[in-house]
Amino acid sequence: MISVLSVAKIIILVSLFTWISACSTAPKKDAAPKQSPAELANIPDAVPRVEPKSELGNMKTYEVFGKRYFVLDSSDGFTQKGIASWYGPDFHGKKTSSGEIYDMYAMTAAHKTLPLPTYLEVKNLENGRKIIVRVNDRGPFHDNRIVDLSYTAAIKLDVIGKGTALVEIRAINPGSYRGGGAPVETRSRPREKRAPPDFYIQVGVFSDYGNATRIKNKLLALEAPVRIEETMLNGAAAFRVKIGPLNDIDIADGIVDRLELFDVHEHRILLE
């Protein structure tokens, strides 16, 4: 006889695998929607409002592809810089990790650790555009990405062409939000041409300079610039090992794919 606890565990596992499959695969970009990009660019941004946490998708911790993630209790004061991607036709109409149905035409996004839902301001650092999205999904489960945008959100940030962009995300407190939807600059501002900002791949922070030097020397085989930067950590000197500066996301992805060969299992993207 199956116990109530066993049934509950089965339900949780089924839900988990459902939203993992919806967020972990790169979308095909050859399935063009009926709406034109110009029409989708006029869809209003998400408007922050106070909501309870979703019943699904807010577990304290979960594991995907052997990596464990810890969901934040609150999004207050949260900011992050890194690489954004997008997901679209392959996932349209499927369940998100919050239990809602994914709508590629809505202003939504996926994040690994923010509470569901969370409202985010997303700024494309390559052209200055800003949007507001509602996070209702988990992902992207790619080593080099911090947020997955809906198709429409990606169009409004001008991410569709390249598929990725360097962004800054900032959590919005709905209780103190006094805006009126999309910032005026987002809808009316023409596309800007900017040089991509430089960024780094940080592969470790070491209290011992010798350990930092050993990692640096191993990574020189990547044929990319590697540096050691002194910093302070918990009141003591520490040494960051960074690859860069870089300004091409594809090159950074190639480097990250090879880090395992050098026994480097953790990294983060740093934008200055």
Image (spheres, grey):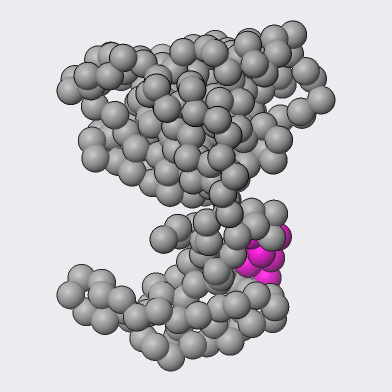
Task: Choose between 14 and 45: the one closer to the eye.
Answer: 45
From this view, report whether residue 143 is shown above or below residue 127.
below
Indicate the position of residue 125 as horizontal and vertical percent values: 49, 45
Residue 25 visible here? no
Residue 56 falls in which quadrant of the image?
A: top left
Q: Position of residue 120 (x, y in %)?
A: 38, 30
Between 147 and 214, the one lying in front of the other is: 147
Of the pair 153 and 265, the residue shown nearer to us? 153
Q: Which residues are magenta?
A: 252-261
259 part of magenta stretch: yes
Q: Measuring 25% from the left and 15% from the top, which residue is drawn there?
A: 50
Secondary structure mostly taken by the magenta-highlighted segment of the chain: helix
Q: Position of residue 169 (x, y in %)?
A: 40, 39
Of residues 73 and 240, which is closer to you in this image? 240
Name of the residue lying farthest toward the bottom: 210
Determine which quarter of the picture holds residue 85: top right
Can you see residue 158? Answer: yes
| 169 relative to 229, above or below | above
Residue shown at 39% from the left, 88% from the top: 209
In the image: residue 9, left or right of residue 120: right
Q: Residue at x 63, y 67 (%)?
A: 259
Q: Is residue 168 magenta?
A: no
142, above or below 103, in the image: below
Q: Position of residue 207 (x, y in %)?
A: 33, 81
